[in-house]
Amino acid sequence: MSSSTQPLEATANTPYEVDECRGILRAYSDGSIVCSAKPSFDVPVHDDGSVLWKDVTFDKTHNLRLRLDKPESPLASKLPIFYYIHGGGFCIGSCAWPNCQNYCFRLCSELQVIVISPDYRLAPENRLPAATEDGYNAVKWLQSQAVAECKDPWLTDVADFYSVFISGDSAGGNVAHNLAVQLGAGSPELAPVRVKGYVLLAPFFGGTALTKSEAEGSKDAFLNWELIERFWRLSIPIGETTDHPLVNPFGLAAGGS
């Protein structure tokens, strides 16, 4: 009798999957998290040598890096700086993913800018406001480069620190928005770095009152409501709702009407 019940007890105690995001992140019933190193967008990197790039650690405490891109043959002696903050529902993604690399290469080449693409801590291990804090620290890193005694000529020889733009898509657009709220444009807090503008690309916002597309959107959509709700459930602070001011800029908690 004991030999037949033991396997049942072992099965009952085995952790089971409770959440999954794009096959990259899997959360289990025992609280463990498993993340795949494989990007969810399996596409080739289009690196033709026209863009030079390198990785830099900007936060040693959390081992966070950012990727710098600059034209191999710039058309001006000083180039504007364009931040690109990746998306992924605050749960997945990286500046090293090939889709992100390709986008940054194109931005760099066609706009003739220096592109800075930072990583940030991901949920659910690091819930909001971690991503926003890391976005802020990535901008402060640029300030440290501008005032450093021993400058990195790879960046500073061509960077126009007075012409900075901060952008991001999806969750990255949310981070860019909250940096705009925190810093505004031309904030003396960043001197001599001057932020001239923000570009939000389909920013990832939420709210307890669903929009029409959220409520009636196709379940087969690439980003359907079930996945959106899952991203929020894993990334908002414990005990909060999607009316949190970092999530819903139009809600009462954020000063909306």
Image (spheres, rainbow, N blue to C red):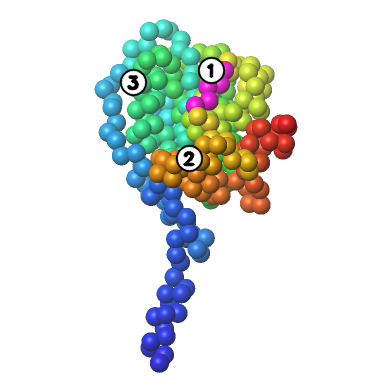
Residue 173 appears in the picture as rendered: yes
Residue designated by label 2: 217
Question: What SS does tag 3 mark?
Answer: strand
Location of the C terminus (image quadrant) = top right
- In percent of width and height, residue 206 lies at 59, 39
Q: Residue furthest bottom?
A: 1
Question: What SS does tag 2 mark?
Answer: loop
Residue at 53% from the left image edge and 22% from the top image edge? 199
Question: Magenta stretch mostly in which secondary structure?
Answer: strand
Three-letter amino acid code of the residue under disc 3: Val
**Residue 131 on the magenta span:** no
Question: What SS does tag 1 mark?
Answer: strand
Marker disc for residue 51: 3
The span shown in magenta is 197-201
Location of the N terminus (image quadrant) = bottom left
Q: Residues within 10 Å of mark 3 (few under 14, many from 20)?
A: some
Front in this rendered view, residue 86 or 65: 86
